[in-house]
Image (cartoon, coloured by chain):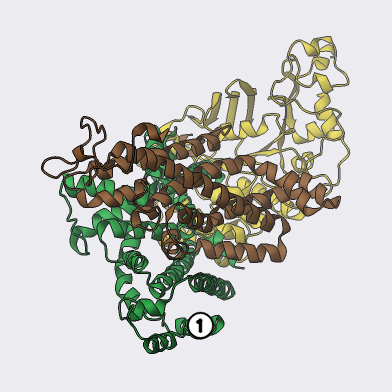
Chain colours: A green, B brown, C yellow
């Protein structure tokens, strides 16, 4: 178990390192002179040289990479070219909002998808309604869905404030967008798992014990059917975060998605890069956490750890 | 076909109402209305469709091609090749596409070409993961093992025995990947990191129109519907291929 | 906790099956099977795969898959298991009739400990409290011959050996003290020594509790070890039944003779093929007209291909269905 954890953490670190390396190479080949962006068009050559030295831009690529990596270990992601602040600070300021929205979205997609999947899984026939809802929702990209909800509940019905920012019921529409966006995937997985579980010999054993129907469902079917949904949540956490970026932009939710979009407009390389790195860390950590939860409720998965 | 719908960039003098507002859906002469500067929505939507099909088709081919090559190679050769290739795949899968897409777009530039590069760079890994799993399964089949035992060169086995058996899977991937590409292309353009104005593109049109949401919702709703219908088409195709021949049999021990 | 009183099966009631039919849509898998088992006695139903023995077992246990239909009667005291519906059926499960399947690994819930899976029978069916049920589960594990019941109770199915899993299944089956136990080849997948241990355990426990035991098997060797009486099935029917000594010493049906006289194979080499000595293979799907065995029977006569021979009395509690027997005195 400890060894398995160590391996998983090691691989996670490796993944993050890979992301840093790739992003760094990418950013390094970009044409243009960041020093000029920062110092402005009228800067003297002396000032430009000073800025370059500060950013280590006058050093070799490898030395720059070394600086960057050493910084990351100390929680330093460099300084924003545009806002005169450390990137790490900018991200930390925005992170709670993103995590709040991400978790709310994850919970909603699991609950909605789980409920629909269970409902459809128990029925003797595949539900037409769910099939239509599924295909319908699969066809609406996250940012489009955000607009649909914004138009419907924000403008037409005025049920929720749409003035941007966090607090109060402002989270409802963004979280609902994420929940509806992810729902069909989870509904499908849970539905298939339900059918598999209902047809499994151990369910027959539970029936043969003379347990009430509800007890068979609750104690034997549901718990086993949710394990694959959790596996998927682990695999698809990156997709969820992608959705978060769009949703943040549409609803004006001040998270790292918005930060990244602004950084894109400003060609603010350290922020762009720092966000990618932090997002990778988030995904790696979330995947590991979901895996641990899955191991806690499904002892079969503990086999993998040996 | 697009030229039938008129010029997408032409600013019509009659495209703005006397009150300075865009024409709504159903206006005479501009059936789908006009946008905030008086351009014909129908023409822009039609050209936007062409743009979407362009980047979707090309980046679908490139990303699936790259992903299939990586997946088959890793799954067939195993060993070190697998280790390295699948770790790289994992790295690409662990960054949310939009976040890395924005970073990537700031380097490769915007426009249709930028979208194609970004989408290819970000989506090949999904195909690679699926194809890798399928190749592992195929590798254990007798006809592949027989070919390996006879000393047939690896490249020949992959080409002759593995890839043909992946064709229906790749078709499903093409449809579902296509749906994702339409969505992410429009999404990036909406964020300003994809196709740039004045080139007509649905996501960019939503971006243009979102400030007029209160008084001219058709500027957002129309491209939105176009995106949804296009993604829907891809999803339905994928669903159809995936379901072909598979009959789901339901048995529940709760019903005995 | 049960409020509905079911026609309570008397403590010693045994099982009487009369003219049992099982159909899977068009397929008529069991075609009028009758037998009875006295309390504390063991009936072995023996036959090749596809002969209808497992369908018979599942029908009596009321565990046929949805879509299958049953006709006939399976009486335990006044209760007809074939007729039981809803609440009556649920109350009968585990308490009147219990079932032990072949594949214990699949039949145990992979994500629950042995204790939980046994204890839930006690808490739901006997109204035991949480701690009573947990203690009862451990006691049951000890009863089925597990050495360290406390430690085994905490384990999950994948952490148990094949023999232990089957013992856990037995503990589940016995937890509500059923009147009838249907054992559907529960030892087939186990190696010989483990199998022998479980055979004698089940025998001992069912006899001590005056349970009627129906043991399904394709292994004539197992029959000799466990049974009081034997029913030989072929093509969806019982072709011969009688006391175990009679069947082994004076088999009357050509199929039974072939079974009994077939040289015993090394079970390790051919665990699933004890019928190698009979040429041909048993019918799958459609059964032939007339005697189902006639295509493989070396003594087959004209009538064998036309009519099903009736069951003929051949001695005390011994009967067989073969045209050759009506031709001879």
Which of the two residues, C97 or B182, is positioned nearer the viewer here?
B182
Q: Position of residue C229 (x, y in %)?
A: 71, 35
Q: Is residue C324 left or right of residue A290?
A: right
- Is residue A209 shown to the viewer in this render? no
Q: Residue, x 46% and y 68% (percent of image)?
A: A280
Residue at the outermost left position: B19
- Is residue B95 shown to the viewer in this render? yes
Rendered position, A38 above or below C22: below
Rendered position, A71 above or below A256: below
When asked about the image quadrant of residue B1, the answer is: top left
Which of the two residues, B233 or C328, is positioned nearer the viewer here?
B233
Q: Residue, x 47% and y 60% (percent of image)?
A: A234
Q: Is residue C46 left or right of residue A285?
A: right
Which of the two residues, C68 or B8, is positioned nearer the viewer here?
B8
Q: Position of residue B83 (x, y in %)?
A: 65, 65
Rendered position, B128 above or below C248: below
Which of the two residues, C206 or B165, is positioned nearer the viewer here?
B165
Q: Is residue C84 left or right of residue C27?
A: left
Q: Which residue is mark 1?
A: A64
Q: Chain of mark 1?
A: A
Q: Residues within 10 Å of mark 1 (few under 14, many from 20)?
A: some
When asked about the image quadrant of residue A306, the answer is: bottom right
């Amino acid at each position: 178990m400890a060894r398995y954890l160590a391996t998983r953490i090691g691989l996670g670190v490796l993944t993050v390192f890979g992301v840093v390396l790739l992003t760094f190479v990418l950013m390094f080949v970009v044409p243009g002179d960041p020093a000029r962006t920062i110092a402005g068009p009228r800067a003297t050559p002396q000032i430009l040289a000073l800025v370059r030295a500060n950013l280590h831009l006058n050093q070799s690529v490898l030395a720059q990479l070394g600086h960057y990596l050493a910084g990351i270990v100390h929680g330093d992601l460099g300084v924003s070219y545009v806002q005169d602040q450390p990137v790490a600070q900018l991200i930390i300021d925005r992170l709670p909002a993103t995590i709040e929205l991400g978790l709310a979205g994850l919970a909603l997609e699991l609950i909605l998808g789980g409920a629909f999947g269970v409902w459809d899984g128990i029925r003797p026939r595949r539900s037409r309604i769910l099939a239509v809802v599924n295909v319908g929702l699969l066809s609406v990209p996250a940012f489009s869905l955000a607009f649909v909800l914004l138009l419907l509940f924000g403008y037409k019905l005025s049920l929720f404030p749409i003035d941007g920012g966090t607090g109060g019921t402002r989270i409802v529409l963004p979280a609902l967008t994420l929940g509806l966006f992810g729902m069909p995937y989870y509904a499908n997985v849970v539905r298939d798992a339900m059918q598999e579980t209902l047809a499994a010999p151990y369910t027959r054993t539970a029936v043969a014990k003379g347990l009430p129907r509800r007890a068979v469902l609750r104690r034997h079917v549901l718990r086993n059917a949710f394990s694959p949904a959790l596996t998927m949540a682990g695999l698809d956490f990156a997709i969820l975060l992608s959705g978060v970026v769009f949703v943040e932009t549409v609803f004006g939710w001040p998270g790292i998605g918005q930060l990244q979009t602004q950084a894109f407009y400003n060609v603010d390389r350290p922020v762009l890069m720092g966000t990618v790195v932090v997002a990778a860390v988030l995904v790696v950590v979330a995947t590991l956490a979901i895996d641990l939860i899955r191991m806690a409720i499904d002892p079969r998965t503990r086999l993998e750890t040996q | 076909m697009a030229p039938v719908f008129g010029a997408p960039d032409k600013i019509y003098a009659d495209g703005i109402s006397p009150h300075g507002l865009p024409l709504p859906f159903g206006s005479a002469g501009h059936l789908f209305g006009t946008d905030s500067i008086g351009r014909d929505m129908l023409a822009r939507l039609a050209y936007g469709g062409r743009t979407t099909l362009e980047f979707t088709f090309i980046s679908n081919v490139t990303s699936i091609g790259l992903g299939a090559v990586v997946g088959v190679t890793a799954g067939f050769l195993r060993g070190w090749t697998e280790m390295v290739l699948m770790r790289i795949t994992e790295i690409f899968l662990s960054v949310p596409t939009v976040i890395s897409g924005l970073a990537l777009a700031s380097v490769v530039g915007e426009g249709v070409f930028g979208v194609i590069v970004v989408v290819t760079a970000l989506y090949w890994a999904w195909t690679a993961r699926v194809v890798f799993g399928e190749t592992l399964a195929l590798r254990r089949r007798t006809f592949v093992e027989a070919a390996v035992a006879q000393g047939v060169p690896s490249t020949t086995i992959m080409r002759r025995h593995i890839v043909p058996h992946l064709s229906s899977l790749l078709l499903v991937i093409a449809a579902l990947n296509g749906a994702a590409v339409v969505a992410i292309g429009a999404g990036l353009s909406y964020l300003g990191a994809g196709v740039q104005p004045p080139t007509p593109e649905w996501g960019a049109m939503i971006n243009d129109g979102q400030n007029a949401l209160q008084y001219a919702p058709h500027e957002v709703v129309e491209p939105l519907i176009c995106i949804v219908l296009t993604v829907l088409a891809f999803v339905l195709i994928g669903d159809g291929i995936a379901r072909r021949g598979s009959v789901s049999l339901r048995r529940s021990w709760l019903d005995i | 906790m049960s409020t509905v009183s079911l026609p309570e099966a008397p403590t010693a009631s045994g099982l009487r099956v009369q003219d049992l039919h099982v159909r899977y849509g068009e397929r008529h898998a069991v075609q009028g099977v009758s037998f009875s088992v006295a309390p504390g006695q063991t009936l072995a139903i023996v036959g090749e795969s596809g002969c209808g023995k497992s369908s018979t077992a599942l029908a009596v246990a009321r565990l046929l898959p949805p879509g299958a239909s049953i006709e006939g009667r399976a009486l335990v005291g006044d209760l007809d298991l074939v007729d039981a519906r809803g609440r009556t059926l649920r109350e009968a499960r585990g308490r009147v009739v219990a079932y032990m399947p072949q594949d214990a690994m699949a039949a145990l819930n992979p994500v629950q400990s042995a204790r939980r899976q046994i204890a839930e029978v006690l808490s739901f069916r006997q109204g035991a409290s949480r701690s009573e049920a947990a203690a009862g589960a451990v006691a049951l594990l000890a009863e089925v011959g597990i050495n360290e019941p406390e430690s085994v109770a905490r384990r999950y199915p994948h952490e148990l050996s094949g023999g232990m899993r089957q013992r856990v299944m037995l503990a589940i089956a016995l937890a509500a003290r059923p009147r009838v136990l249907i054992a559907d080849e529960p030892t087939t997948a186990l190696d010989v020594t483990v199998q022998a241990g479980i055979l004698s355990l089940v025998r001992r426990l069912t006899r001590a509790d005056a349970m009627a035991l129906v043991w399904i098997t394709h292994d004539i060797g197992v029959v000799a070890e466990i049974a009081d009486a034997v029913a030989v099935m072929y093509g969806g029917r019982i072709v011969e039944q009688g006391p175990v000594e009679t069947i082994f010493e004076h088999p009357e049906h050509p199929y039974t003779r072939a079974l009994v006289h077939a040289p015993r194979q090394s079970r390790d080499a051919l665990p699933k093929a004890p019928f190698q000595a009979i040429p041909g293979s048993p019918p799958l799907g459609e059964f032939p007209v007339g005697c189902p065995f006639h295509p493989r029977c070396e003594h087959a006569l004209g009538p064998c291909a036309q009519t099903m021979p009736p069951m003929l009395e051949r001695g005390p509690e011994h009967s067989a269905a073969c045209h050759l027997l009506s031709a001879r005195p």
